[in-house]
Amino acid sequence: MRNLGKITIILAIWFAPFLLSITGCEEKQLQPIDKLVTDANNIVTAGGAILQSPAGDLLPPLWQVIGALAIAIGSILVNGWQKVRANLMKKTTKAIVKGIEAAEQVEKPNPTNPVKAAIGDQMRAAGIYDKGNEIVDLLKVSR
C-alpha cells in the first residue's frame, strides 16, 4: 500500500494531458464524458460496497488488493473530473455576475434591474436567496 501514493502521482501525470486537452472542448463534447463519469462513479461505489461486504472477504487476497487499487484509481479520476467541471461552472457563474454588473454600469445604475429581479425571484423560489446572495457578493469581488 506504500506504493499507492506513487501510483496516484503517476496516474495524475498520465491523465494531465487528457484533462488539459478537454478544456478547449465544447459543452456538447463534454456531456458524454459526464455520463461516463457518472457511470464510473456508480461502478466504483458498488465495487467498494462489494469489497466491504461479507462477500468481499471471500475473494482471494490478491483480488482484494487489485479491487481496492481499482476503486482508488476510479475515485481519483471521478473526483478529478468533477473538479474540472466545478471549476468550469465557477468561471461561468463569475462571468455572468460580472457581465450583469458591467452592463448595469454602462447604462445607468438601476436598482430595479429586471435581470437581477428575475435572478432574485428564482433564488427565492429555490429557497436559497440568503446563501445565493452571499455567493454572488463573493463572486463580484473575486478575480
Image: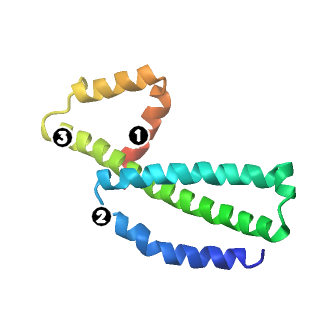
Task: Tell me the residue that label 2 is attached to.
Answer: 24
Q: Nearer the viewer, mark 2 or mark 3?
A: 2
Query: Disc 1 on helix, strand or loop?
Result: helix
**Residue 137 has which mark?**
1
**Where residue 128 appears, x then y in whole percent?**
48, 27
Q: Residue 25 at what x, y percent from top left?
A: 30, 60
Is label 2 in a helix, a strand or a loop? loop
Judged from this view, the residue extending furthest toward the left is 107
Residue count near mark 1 (Cα–Cα under 10 Å), binned few <14, some 14–19, many ≥20: few
Assess whether mark 3 and mark 2 are in contact (beta carbons under 8 angstroms).
no
Q: Are marks 1 and 2 in contact (CB under 8 Å)?
A: no
- Residue at 87% across, 58% down: 58
Taking the image as drawn, is residue 70 in sight? yes
Q: Which mark is residue 103?
A: 3
Residue 44 lies in quadrant: bottom right
Q: Residue 5 is drawn in which quadrant?
A: bottom right
Q: Earlier in the sequence, mark 2 or mark 3?
A: 2
Q: Position of residue 69 (x, y in %)?
A: 70, 68
Residue at (68, 49) in percent of width and height: 46
For the residue pair 42 and 94, the one nearer the viewer reads as 42
- The quadrant of the rendering that contains the C terminus is bottom left
| Type of amino acid at the residue the image marks with label 1 | Asp
13 above or below 21?
A: below
Asked if residue 113 can be seen in this view, the reply is no
Q: Quadrant of the N terminus?
A: bottom right
Mark 1 near mark 3, Cβ–Cβ under 8 Å? no
Give whichever of 47, 78 is nearer the camera.
47
Dot 3 alpha-carbon crowd within 10 angstroms: few under 14, some 14 to 19, many 20 or more: few
Closer to the N terminus: mark 1 or mark 2?
A: 2
- Residue 106, percent across and down? 14, 41
Q: Nearer the viewer, mark 1 or mark 2?
A: 2
